[in-house]
Amino acid sequence: MILTGVLLAVIGLGLVGWFSARGRARLLYTGRGSMHSMPSYHGWHMALWIIVPALLAWTAWSFMMPGLVDGTVLASPAAAQLPPDAMSRAAILSEARTVASNPNAAVFNPLSATLAESMGAAQQRFGLIGGLIVLIVALAGGGYGLTRVRAGFPARTQVERAVLGVLLLASLMAILTTFGIVASLLFEAGLFFKDVSPIAFLTGTHWAPGNAGGENISDNFGAVPLFWGTIYIGAIIAMLVAIPLGLMSAIYLTQYASSKVRKVLKPMLEILAGIPTVVYGYFAALSVAPIMRDFAASIGMSNPSTESALAAGMVMGVMIIPFVSSMADDSLAAVPRAMSDGSLALGATRSETIKRVLLPAALPGIVAGVMLAISRAIGETMIVVMAAGAAARLSLNPFDSMTTVTYQIVQLLTGDQEFNSPKTLSAFALGLVLFIVTLILNIIALRVVKRFREAYE
Amino acid sequence: MSNAVWQTPEAVRRLAKRHAAERRFRLLGLSAIVLSLAFLALLLVIMLENGLGGLDWQFLTGSDSTNPDLAGVWGAAKGSMLTMLVTLVLSFPIGVLAAALP
């Protein structure tokens, strides 16, 4: 409460500082070239000196305060009745914190009501102390800033440097987040591989994390059926749909369609990429899968399941079509005009030119596009969750239900989970494998595209 | 004259074959794009057919409920909007500032 008010006060002080420093700097202005920096830069310099240190102090205090408050409350005489074990202590303390901020809150533990009083007092006291510290820091920063308002002071350089620092911080944020994600993945996967051997994980064929435990724990974490399901659905069935349709669409759009037709058809094709994957998911599960099941029954399969790799893979392929198509489009357009003109001038028909000249020349780009498409398909989650099924099995039959890495991660991490069991941790190992495979595919694809671009420039 | 060479029955036949292949290829391209768009149309038709009937003001403004007649998406929509808001507030400044780094 108090700290929020202090924050507003600091911003107000910054505003006051901005105006006063600018006003003082204006008084110093005696003519062209009499000052290093414009008055408003002095204002900004002053405001930064007030706000930045105060904000740092405020953040530090916000982190420290709960600990200090808890320490005071625990030292109070009422706290002597607290149960000794840490967990119920923390529960009562947090309840007291709720009561202190909202006296009407329901109380489960009578002790917390008595603690709430000292909790509230401690919060008040430490809030006041923290607010004073922050204000003092702000005023000290402001005092320092005020002494800098001199004609020769390079306020502009300083402000520019501060802005550069902010920009650098913003770009580091993205990089640090990525590193954080990778680090957490590595750390949790490391915990998992402490219990389960990596070789058993990568080569085993029995996946049953639910009944893992005891001596032969590694036997239940064979992830090969998952990898097979992922590859079968994402890289084989989906690509069998997406590559011919996407490639032929791109060829038609770039080589045959008039620009008017192209202007209509291309955005319509892109709509396919804009449909939420959840919608694809229920489309696969509710519309495509029953058709597949009936079809499987009609060709004599006994007891076909509603969840099939074929339904999930086909719908995923449809989702990927615009992706493949636009990548192929780009690489076909990058082939120099002279090559296809030369072929046409020799008397080849358009389709012969496309098959013999354009496609070979554009092949690296197309392959790269397909790789990116695969990396998208194997990371796709919603469609397989809805349509592919949970049974981890190694099967070549596309009408069987199959499971994928992403589906299993969803299964392992949704709901209440304990984070010390290998069952939960295996999700991170699966995520790590998925991440590495996707990363490799992306790196190869980008390399190929880069080399290909260079070849024609 | 070269005309004689190009108009022998064999050459004419070969040319016709090549032109037929050309037409086939073109048709293949067109059918690929038509098939893709047919998927899109099918998806939209199924969605509209099953969804339009349930869409009314009550559905748009109602909150979660165990009673299907009262249930609506307003609560969920609000959650989506708040998620979008948080994403915007986080990513817009950081993204723009990171892009501005000289």
Image (cartoon, coloured by chain):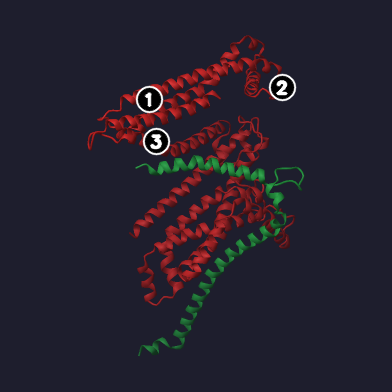
Chain colours: A red, B green
Q: Secondary structure at mark 3?
A: helix
Q: Give the quarter of the image for residue A96.
A: top right
Q: Which mark is residue A166?
A: 3
Q: Earlier in the sequence, mark 3 or mark 2?
A: 2
B29 above or below A193?
Answer: below
List x then y, in percent, for residue A4: 52, 27
* Disc 2: which residue: A108
List x then y, in percent, for residue A279: 63, 53
Are labels 3 and 1 assigned to the same chain? yes
The amino acid pointed to by label 1 is Gly
Q: Of residues A360 and A254, which is closer to you in this image?
A: A254
Q: In which quadrant is the C terminus of chain A drawn?
A: bottom left
Decide if residue A227 is in sight here: yes
Q: Earlier in the sequence, mark 1 or mark 2?
A: 2
The amino acid pointed to by label 2 is Phe
A310 above or below A204?
Answer: below
* Disc 1: which residue: A142
Closer to the eye: label 3 or 1? 1
Q: Residue at x 34, y 34 (%)?
A: A159
> Does residue B61 appear to the left or right of A192 in the view shown?
right
Q: Secondary structure at mark 2?
A: loop
> Does residue B34 appear to the left or right of A342 in the view shown?
right
- The CA span between labels 1 and 2 is 48 Å
Q: Give the quarter of the image for residue A313.
A: bottom right
